[in-house]
């Protein structure tokens, strides 16, 4: 989608600090980090929200979680632990309407979330 910021990042039309990329997913540093490690994992396919992910597209999430494991290891937070957050729509706190997951780590996370 032309006016989608994450599509533009996926196409390298606007800069980002990429930590991993393959044909299906791009992962980059969040511009406003909420933890010492804050990576966004973004499928290259434009899907607005989790609610719009179709049954035959579920492998998008499968792959995204495998990449999450790799990045957690790369960032050396695989044993200390981390949180994966996927915000959906307004009450979920979604601000960019291109499906993505946050990988947060490097500090103890609070529960319940805000
Ligand atoms: P969400 O609120 O779940 O939709 O998450 C959107 C995230 O994208 C926020 O954490 C923003 O800080 C982040 N973000 C927005 N624009 C950029 C950008 N150009 N580069 C990196 N991260 C961004
Ligand atoms: Zn997009």
Image: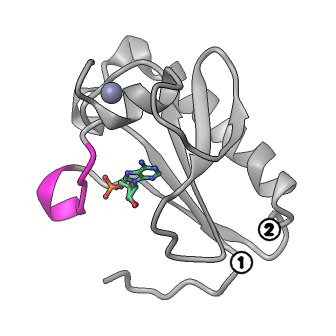
Is residue 60 found left or right of 77 in the rendered image? Answer: left
Ligand 1 is found in the corner quadrant, namely bottom left
| Residue 47, percent from left and from top | 31, 25
Query: Farthest left residue?
Result: 90
Q: Could you give the CA–CA distance between mark 2 and mark 1, rounded to whole angstroms?
A: 6 Å
Which quadrant: the N terminus?
Answer: top left
Helix, strand or loop at mark 2: loop
Count every numbered label the image shows and give the total: 2
Residue at (56%, 83%) from the top-left corner? 109
**Which residue does the numbered mark 1 point to in the structure image?**
106
* Residue 77 picture quarter: bottom right
Q: Is residue 107 above or below residue 91?
A: below
**In which quadrant will I find the C terminus?**
bottom left
Q: Residues within 10 Å of mark 1 (few under 14, many from 20)?
A: some
| 99 sits left or right of 49 in the view | right
User: Which label number is shown at residue 77?
Assistant: 2
In this orientation, which residue lies closer to the viewer: 62 or 104? Answer: 104
Give whichever of 1, 53 is nearer the camera: 1
Residue under the image location 23 percent in, 27 percent down = 3
Find residue 83 and report its image quarter. bottom right
In the rendering, at what x and y percent does residue 31 appear?
A: 48, 60
Question: Residue at the location (64% across, 14% down)?
Answer: 23
* Residue 40 drawn in magenta: no
- The way the protein has been coloured in the rendering is one colour
Q: Which residues are magenta?
A: 89-96
Q: Is residue 47 above or below residue 68?
A: above
Q: CB under 8 Å between callouts 2 and 1?
A: yes
Q: Kindly state the secondary structure of the residue where label 1 is placed.
A: loop
Residue 63 lies, in percent from the top left, at 63, 28
| Residue 17 x, y percent position in the rendering | 64, 47
């Amino acid at each position: 989608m032309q006016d989608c910021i994450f599509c533009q990042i996926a196409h390298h039309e606007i800069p980002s600090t990429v930590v991993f990329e393959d044909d299906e997913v791009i992962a980059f540093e969040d511009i406003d980090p909420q933890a010492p490690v804050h990576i966004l994992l973004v499928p290259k396919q434009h899907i607005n929200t989790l609610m719009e992910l179709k049954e035959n597209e579920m492998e998008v999430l499968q792959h995204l979680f495998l990449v999450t494991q790799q990045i957690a290891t790369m960032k050396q937070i695989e044993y200390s632990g981390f949180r994966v957050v996927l915000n959906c729509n307004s009450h979920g706190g979604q601000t960019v309407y291109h499906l993505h997951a946050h990988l947060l780590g490097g500090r103890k996370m609070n529960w319940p979330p805000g």
